[in-house]
Image (cartoon, rainbow, N blue to C red):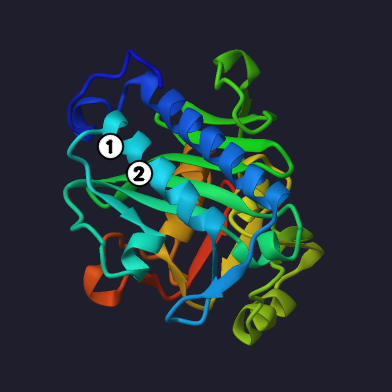
Amino acid sequence: MHSDIPSTSASAVTRDPALLIGLAEAVLAAGAVIMRIRAEGFEAGTKADESPVTAADLASEELLRARLEKLLPGVPVIAEEAVSQGRGETPGGAFLLVDPLDGTREFIAERGEFTINIGLVENGVPIFGALYAPAVERLYLGGPEGAFRADLHPGAPAGRQHWRPIACRPVPATGIVAVASRSHLDPDTAQLLEALDVLERVSCGSALKFGLVAEGLADIYPRLSPVCEWDVAAGHAILRAAGGSVTRPDGAPLAYGRTGERYIVPSFLARGRTDAGG
């Protein structure tokens, strides 16, 4: 754990570069746990909402919660598995949204497109994000100082010498590259993609889709079916840092910390650089 991060609230460290290093260290460590469990073998269970869960989801969340409580003491941690078990914390002015294994179906199918997501939301806006895909050794980071990609193996040190700056490209008027879900492509999203002037469509699992837009490899990632806040917050922070945006399809800002709606995001549109931010 990085030792230079002060033990205080998120508001006091949102300009501290050490926070981004701490988030990177957390997802890299969780990636090592997930890959160990995958190598040893596991069984998949089913949660109350009929979505899958494995020992890797639970072990990753336990590690991340412990690390984040040390990194940002007193900042609520809203994590997927805890919420599914009725143990969700109450969001504050600043809070963390955590998906310990985004793309569990991809994990079970032994594909590499699953990620670990951490987003720090402050005053309703995702400020910091860390997104790590351990099977393909790809780390995306975003914060007030910018957005970065690093190619690091699970459990590796999070040294900045491995980070390279990334940025969204301007969204072209025609011939856009769209990225869409491999496992959750709903009819409304498919219809929207058909209506756009799409030169190329890339199918991809988990929050890796945000990373592709953030580093200028794709222009748009639409999702018109429900998803949870912990699936979006990390990618949203990284895209903001890279010059892109994540909004509701009508352009209105996304809201976070919506306990009354069980943290459901009905739909969103993630885009590369345009005249409007978000």
Relative image position of residue 51 (x, y in whole percent):
53, 76
Q: Examine the rendered structure and indicate whether residue 204 appears above or below residue 28.
A: below
- Give the residue drawn at x 57%, y 46%: 273
Can residue 241 be seen from the camera position used here? Answer: yes
Q: Which mark is residue 132?
A: none
Residue at (71, 44) in percent of width and height: 135
Image point 30% across, 19% down: which residue? 5
Q: Position of residue 251 (x, y in %)?
A: 43, 65
- The residue at the far bottom in this view is 187
Q: Position of residue 34 (x, y in %)?
A: 60, 47
Along the line of sight, the residue nearer the viewer: 39 or 167: 39
Up-down relation of residue 104 to residue 266 (above or below): above
Do callouts 1 and 2 mark residues in contact (Cβ within 8 Å)? yes
- Density class for disc 2 (Cα within 10 Å; few <14, some 14-19, many ≥20) is some
x and y percentages locating residue 32 in the rendered image? 60, 37
Q: Which residue is mark 1?
A: 69
Query: Residue at image x 64%, y 51%?
Result: 208
Query: Does 81 sit left or right of 272 as displayed?
Result: left
Kindly state the secondary structure of the residue where label 1 is placed.
Answer: helix
> Split into 4 quadrants, where in the image is the N terminus?
top left
Find the residue positioned furthest to the right.
199
Q: Is residue 195 above or below residue 201?
A: below
Viewer-proximal residue, 203 or 91? 91
Give the amino acid type for the residue marked by disc 2 in the picture. Answer: Arg
Whether residue 234 is visible here, answered yes or no, is: no
Which image quarter: residue 101?
A: bottom right
Q: Residue furthest front?
A: 40
Position of 131 compared to 81: left or right?
right
Residue type at tag 1: Glu
Q: Which residue is mark 2?
A: 65
